[in-house]
Image: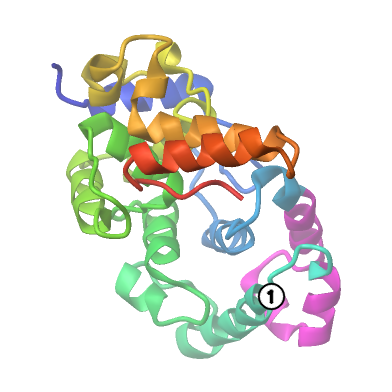
Amino acid sequence: MEKPDSTALLAWYDRHRRNLPWRAPPGIHPDPYRIWLSEIMLQQTTVATVGPYFDRFVARWPDISALAAASLDEVLRLWQGLGYYARARNLHACARAVVERHGGVFPEQAEALRALPGIGDYTAAAIAAIAFNRRGAAVDGNVERVVARLYGVREPLPAAKPRLRALASALIPDQRTGDFAQALMDLGATICMPRRPRCVLCPWRACCAADKAWPARRHDRDPVYVLARCSVVNRRSDPGSPRRGRVVAAAWHRAPRLYPFPP
């Protein structure tokens, strides 16, 4: 089996990258403010939902200093409907901390970013990689799924997290680390999806353990896919249906708990 090649993933990304409002065009240096704002908004929220909120925020407050000068009430009003309001409070607190501690300039190192309100390990790694091209693994649920399938990791979460992070770190190239981080995110969001992954279009298909172990169109044999497939039954079946309960229970029993059921 071939070794995963960052060049193949980056070539795929250059052709198929998503056009997102916070993503800088090719050849343009990313704006750390826009990357940070998008990463906070995207926590537990879909890209489709975040888009209009992001546009309204940057139209109202185009940079970190403008956001820091706003009142918390103003921020909460514009955030209304996005949910998880602690994120909005941390957003405002973080903006003020960047202005007060760093003169309105985001620090480039993940360690310094983690010291800011509302920024955890993943968000710090994502900002450092995308905005500053720093080498570090930005590992969210999508990336965990991609790496677990790529290497055939069957260990349950959260115990598997350190191994998945180490495997993801080993994939990072020396150049274009920000593009690579976004390429992994796009791969998980558009190709290596929880349900009905589009394996035939994957740039890493030739080196993917899941694709090799379970033949095409037989992904129900993969524990990862079993959970995802039965979550569809869980979502679509009548809540009172005995069949619904039996199918979900059987799948949970025979599949390792690599990933939880989607909400």
Foreground residue among 107 and 87:
87
Residue drawn at the location 26% of the way across and 40% of the way down: 175
Residue 255: x percent and y percent? 35, 38
Quick one: quadrant of the N terminus? Answer: top left
Quadrant of residue 61 in the image?
bottom right
Quadrant of residue 144 in the image?
top left
Q: Secondary structure at mark 1?
A: helix
Foreground residue among 159 and 227:
227
Looking at the image, which residue sits at the far bottom?
100
Residue 246: x percent and y percent? 55, 37
Rendering colour mode? rainbow
In the rendered view, does 140 fall on the left or right side of 41?
Answer: left
Q: How packed is label 1: few (under 14 Cα within 10 Å), some, or many (20 or more)?
A: many
Disc 1: which residue: 88
Q: Is residue 67 magenta?
A: yes
For the image shown, how many numbered marks are present on the structure? 1
In the rendered view, does 93 fall on the left or right side of 215?
Answer: right
Q: Is residue 217 magenta?
A: no
Residue 248: x percent and y percent? 53, 39
Looking at the image, which residue sits at the far front?
242
Residue type for callout 1: Ala
Which span is picked out in magenta? 52-78
Quadrant of residue 202 in the image?
top left
Q: Is residue 66 visible?
A: yes
Q: Is residue 11 visible?
A: no
Residue drawn at the location 46% of the way across and 83% of the way down: 102
Foreground residue among 211 and 214:
214
Q: Main secondary structure of the magenta part?
A: helix
Q: Is residue 88 above or below residue 157?
A: below
Residue 212: x percent and y percent? 24, 15
Residue drawn at the location 38% of the way across and 42% of the way down: 253
